[in-house]
C-alpha cells in the first residue's frame, strides 16, 4: 500500500474544498488485528478512519484557499474532557523529563512523531525514538509523540500542536549554538505537506512553510530532519540550510510505500531506521544504504520508485562528526516484521 492519502482524480470544475477532501481521503484499512484474544475490544485499539477529512482551507479564490494551507490548519472535535486532560498531563510529564544540555558537549535532542492514528506509524515512531536515542547519545533527551498501536497507549499523541509545543520546549532546554535537533516524522503525506489524521477526531496539514517558520522562530538551526511520508520531498526547499541535514522518504512528486495499518514498518522506516541507522556508519552512508534498499524492494514489487531525497548542508560537517563519534560501534538488531516479506 502506498504511504500516502490516495488522491482521487479531480473532477473538472469541482470546488477546491471537494478536491482537498478527495486528496486527503484515507484508504480503507482493516484493523481486525486489534481485537484481543478473547474477542473483546482491545483498550489500546487505535481509532479507525471512517470519514474524509473536511475542507480545512480558507479564502474566496482557489489561490487563496491553496495558500491557506501554509498556515498548517488543524481541526479537532469530539475529544472528551478527561481525554484532553490526560493528554495534557502526558505531554507535560514528557517535556518536564527532558534533560538539560551539557555545556561543551554537542547534545542531540530527539523528537519522533506519528501524525496519523494508523498504528504502523505509532510503532515506527516508538522504535525510531529508541534507535535515534541510542545512535546519538540522547537518553533522557528523547521525546516520542504517538497514539495507541494495538498493544500500548502510554504516550502523548502526535498532532501538529503537540509537535510544535514539543519543539518549543526543546528549544528552551538545548543550547541552540551548540546542540542539535534530530526529528523523525512518520505519517501519510500529500503535496501540501504532512497529514495529521487521528481517527475521525483530528485533522490537519503540516506545511513546509509552517515547519520552516517554527524552527526559525525557535532558533533551532542545527538539525537532522527525517521525514517519512509520500511527497515528503516538498519539504526540502523550505527546510534546506547550511546547518540542516534533510532526508525524506520520497521525492516531491512520488509516493512511498508500506503504510498498511498491520505493518510494523513502512518501507522507508524499515530501511532507514530499522537497518541503516542502527549501524555505526555516517549519516550520508546510511541515507545511501536506505535509498538502495527501498529501490530494491520497489523493483521487486514493480512499484514506481519513491526516490528518497537527501540534502546535507555544508556546515553540518562542523557538528555532525562530534555526534557520530559517540555512536555505538556495534549495530543493534532490527526488530518487528520486515516491511517487505522475505
Image (cartoon, rainbow, N blue to C red):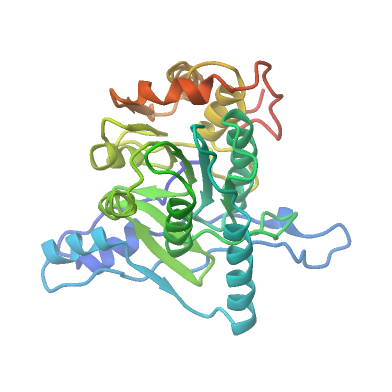
Residue 175 appears in the picture as rendered: yes
Quarter the C terminus occupies: top right
Above or below for 78 versus 159: below
Q: Residue at x 61, y 24 (%)?
A: 278
| Residue 302: quarter of image | top left
Indicate left or right for 152 with 120 as reference.
right
Image location of residue 327, percent across then percent down: 59, 22
Indicate left or right for 74 with 77 as reference.
left
Image location of residue 7, percent across then percent down: 34, 52
Image location of residue 322, percent across then percent down: 48, 23
Q: Residue at x 30, y 25 (%)?
A: 315
The residue lying furthest to the bottom in this view is 81
Indicate left or right for 13 with 230 as reference.
left
Image location of residue 141, percent across then percent down: 58, 45
The residue lying furthest to the right in this view is 38
The residue lying furthest to the front in this view is 103
Q: Residue at x 33, y 51 (%)?
A: 211
| Residue 85: quarter of image | bottom right
Above or below for 2 versus 295: below
Pick the residue in front: 274 or 294. 274
Q: Residue at x 37, y 21 (%)?
A: 317
- Image mark count: 0
Residue 297 appears in the picture as rendered: no
Amino acid at each position: 500500500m502506498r504511504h500516502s492519502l490516495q488522491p482521487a482524480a479531480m473532477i473538472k470544475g469541482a470546488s477546491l474544498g471537494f478536491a482537498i477532501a478527495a486528496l486527503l481521503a484515507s484508504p480503507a484499512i482493516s484493523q481486525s488485528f486489534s481485537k484481543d484474544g478473547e474477542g473483546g475490544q482491545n483498550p489500546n485499539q487505535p481509532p479507525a478512519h471512517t470519514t474524509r477529512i473536511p475542507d480545512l482551507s480558507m479564502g474566496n479564490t482557489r489561490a487563496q484557499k491553496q495558500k491557506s494551507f501554509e498556515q498548517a490548519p488543524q481541526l479537532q472535535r469530539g475529544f472528551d474532557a478527561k481525554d484532553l486532560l490526560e493528554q495534557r498531563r502526558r505531554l507535560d510529564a514528557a517535556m518536564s523529563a527532558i534533560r538539560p544540555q551539557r555545556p561543551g558537549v554537542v547534545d542531540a535532542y530527539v523528537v519522533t512523531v506519528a501524525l496519523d492514528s494508523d498504528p504502523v506509524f505509532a510503532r515506527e515512531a516508538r522504535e525510531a525514538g529508541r534507535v535515534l536515542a541510542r545512535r546519538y547519545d540522547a537518553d533522557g533527551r528523547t521525546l516520542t509523540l504517538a497514539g495507541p498501536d494495538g498493544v500500548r497507549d502510554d504516550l502523548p499523541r502526535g498532532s501538529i500542536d503537540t509537535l510544535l509545543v514539543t519543539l518549543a520546549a526543546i528549544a528552551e532546554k538545548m543550547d541552540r549554538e551548540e546542540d542539535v535537533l534530530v526529528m523523525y516524522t512518520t505519517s501519510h503525506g500529500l503535496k501540501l505537506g504532512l497529514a495529521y489524521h487521528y481517527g475521525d477526531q483530528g485533522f490537519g496539514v503540516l506545511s513546509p512553510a509552517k515547519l520552516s517558520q517554527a524552527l526559525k522562530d525557535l532558533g533551532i538551526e542545527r538539525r537532522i530532519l527525517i521525514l517519512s511520508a509520500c511527497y515528503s520531498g516538498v519539504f526540502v526547499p523550505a527546510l534546506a540550510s547550511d546547518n540542516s541535514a534533510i532526508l525524506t522518504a520520497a521525492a516531491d512528486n512520488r509516493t512511498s510505500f508500506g503504510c498498511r495499518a498491520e505493518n510494523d514498518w513502512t518501507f522507508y522506516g524499515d530501511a532507514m531506521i530499522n537497518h541503516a541507522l542502527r549501524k555505526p556508519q555516517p549519516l550520508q552512508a546510511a541515507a545511501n544504504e536506505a535509498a538502495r534498499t527501498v529501490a530494491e524492494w520497489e523493483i521487486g514489487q514493480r512499484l514506481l520508485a519513491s526516490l528518497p531525497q537527501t540534502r546535507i548542508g555544508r556546515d553540518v560537517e562542523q557538528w555532525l562528526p562530534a555526534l557520530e563519534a559517540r555512536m555505538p560501534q556495534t549495530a543493534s538488531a532490527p526488530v518487528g516484521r520486515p516491511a517487505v516479506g522475505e
